[in-house]
Amino acid sequence: MISKKYHQIVSLFVIGLTIFYSFYSLMPSAKIEKNSSLTEFSTNKVLLQLKEIAKKPHFTGSPAHEIVRNYLVSELEKLGLQVEIQEQMAVNKKWRAATNTKNILARIKGSENGKALLLLSHYDSNPHSSLGASDAGSGVVVILEGIRAFLAKKEIPKNDIIICISDAEELGLLGANAFVNHHPWAKEVGLVLNFEARGSGGPSYMLLETNGGNKKLIEAFQESNTAYPVASSLMYSIYKMLPNDTDLTVFREGGNMDGYNFAFIDDHFDYHTVQDSYERMDINSLNHQASYLMATLNYFANADLENLKSETDYVYFNFPYIGLVFYPFSWVIPMFLFCVVLFFLMLHFGVLKKKLTKKGIVKGFYPFIASLLTSAALAFFGWRLLLKIHPQYKDILQGFTYNGYYYIAAFVSLTIAICFWFYKDFFKKRSKQDLLIAPLFFWLVINGFIAFYLPGAAFFILPVLILLPLLFIAQFSISKVDTLLFFTLFTIPVLIILAPLVKMFPVGLGLKMLVVSAVFTVLLFGFMVPVFQQYKDHKKLSFMFLFIGFMALISASVYSGYSIDRKKPNSVLYVFDSNKNEAYWASYNTETDDFTKQFLGENPTKGSYDGNSTASKYKTNIQFHTKTAVINMQKPIISVVLDTIIGSDRKLTLRIESPRNANKIELLTKTPIHFKSFMVNNEAVKNDRNGKYVFSVEKGTIMNFYRTSKDEILEIEFVVDKDQVMNIDILEAKYDLFSNPQFKITPRTEMMMPMPFVLNDATVIKTNIKL
């Protein structure tokens, strides 16, 4: 027996160990084997391939892109596979993008004639500086090594296995678009396994995509017996909140194909940058991807892929050693109503039997609501204050700073300190059952909302299912035995399941979500009230977490600057307005630095050189510009090939040639345009609206066209109303700022890098046409 005086120490140790384990159990540990069986996955082989792929930025159309493609073709041919390059023009209306794609395809023949399993990842990196090690070199090499190990077993699968290493994912999922809409194999696909990344580390999350219910997909995934499944029905809801899709989205939307995404998202600050490198790739994350691939490949290669559709949805979440725990959506409302009825019955009988006091219940709401409001306000306004103190954070467009983990630790610790402070007197004066009513009530209210509006998060009923028995025991137990350790053990399952979400929200959605972490921490603290009420020295615990919080803030401040390993993102463009015969230097940075000052000077003009300039997917606009000298550049040749009126329609064909071999041509409008049809180099935009117009643009980007060869010509054919007003800007961009001999530029220091997500290090020729 443990002496009663040590119960608090043991309880704190168990809680701390449980929270540590909730994170530790999510992924495998780093391991590079020296000698492995031919039929086993080799991390060492994968790293060698990844190092080869991530040598240089290899965005679609770049010289390195072709080198990487040839290398991957060679690696697949070494496995004895016949490789096909699917070359196809593709257009994506949602992302307003088009290019000539080159997908890498191979196929392993199965013994039966059922649906095929498709393994998917993309080999292009993001323009123009990303090395693409994690996104998505990691996915490509995991597939290569997984297929090698699979073939080494010399077993013929029941299903055909298609390998699709897609192109131009970063430009707008264009390779996937080309495969789904134009390749005959697409009609034979029964399931897709897609490997992605949105950072350079952390656990890999399984995010399924389906147009129907997830029941059979979840059951099949559980049958595949993956070693470290990390998934929940809430994650897909969060995934849909992010401003990006994956190739798998195209397969689901365009081909009604179901599939699983496997993606890691930690260290988001590396995403789409030169820091997405081989050296910064987390081997744990790579091994996690491998664990998914080997389990799902071996299972689905021989499973029935014809019967994965369902109309039933499951709530699901992962738990160590069990895998996925799941139950039907149809249980959600009955479970909620059952808990509500049980809660009010216990409330009624508790008051009736004088185990609960009305005064105590009401007063129990005071510390909980005070903790909730104070912590939320501190996180919300605290982060905004930090952005004022450190304005450079706004230039990290991912929304997650290099010191972001310190901020998570800081605000979570301060939230716990606030909770202990507000509860310290109430813990002494009120019973645990009185204090338990407030958090239990709030958990029920949240689950009421979830039951009717967000059933994917319905596993949040778990704290309620634990607290109701604890409330019963606290009220009606006649035993005088100390319940501290007993109650602590009861909290373990909930902490294992929910504690990682405190970190996941700001990691996945940016540090602006620290307020969500703070609120969630208060909810978990409320869940722990039956345990914490039995602690002593609550004031000391409050000061302890206050100290931890301030130490984390100090650490964050120490690491708030930039270094060789935490590079400062900056941007610069040279823009020539051919209509005005004027030129400008422009930058997306919110502050100038030594690099951008050589272009912008000491006192640049705030805002953009034009109200209709290109922006990032995060709506980032040009922040500074300075007028400069005009240099000699070959202008694009823009011609109207066709302009005719047919009834109430006007049909036009616009041709744009680039004598200087630009990388990108972007069309923007200053006025609303409604297109009845739209075609890029004979590839039509689909009319999925079943209406008069294919798509409409109020203002801004009409289409981005990415050139992939020297003599490539852009030809756009479209139909509008005959009275449609058109005022179009054409931006022709080339990533030649540093190679152009007309500029004398001091390069970035080792502590700097090109800013991602925006047009950068480019010369741009802007031409306005009024049609």
Image (cartoon, rainbow, N blue to C red):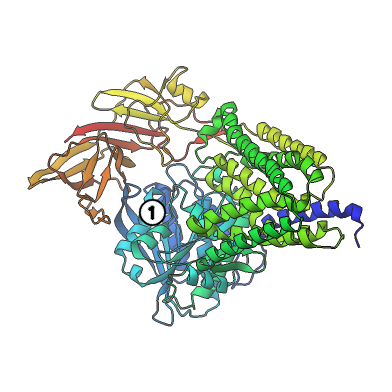
Q: Nearer the viewer, residue 631 or 274?
A: 274
* Classed neighbour count for the residue bearing mark 1: other residues with Cα under 10 Å, few (<14), some (14–19), many (≥20): many
Q: State left or right for residue 455 relative to residue 250.
A: right
Residue 220, percent from left and from top: 52, 73
Q: State left or right for residue 458 relative to residue 1.
A: left
Quadrant the C terminus occupies: top left
Residue 618, percent from left and from top: 44, 40
Q: Is residue 756 above or below residue 572?
A: below
Q: Nearer the viewer, residue 466 or 635?
A: 466
Residue 379, percent from left and from top: 61, 37
Kind of element beneath mark 1: loop
Residue at x 43%, y 53% (from the top left corner): 245
* Quarter-of-image position of residue 581: top left
Quadrant the N terminus occupies: bottom right
Q: Nearer the viewer, residue 209 or 495?
A: 495
Figure label count: 1
Residue at x 69%, y 41% (from the top left corner): 366
* Quarter-of-image position of residue 760: top left
Instruction: Report the residue marked by disc 1.
Output: 173
Q: Amino acid at mark 1?
A: Leu
Task: Report the residue that reaches farthest toward the front.
Answer: 352
Q: Answer whether residue 58 is visible to the viewer in this image.
A: yes
* Quarter-of-image position of residue 519: top right
Q: Nearer the viewer, residue 44 or 254?
A: 254
Task: Report the residue that reaches farthest toward the top.
Answer: 603
Residue at x 42%, y 44% (from the top left corner): 127
Q: Is residue 146 above or below residue 678?
A: below
Residue 573, percent from left and from top: 39, 30
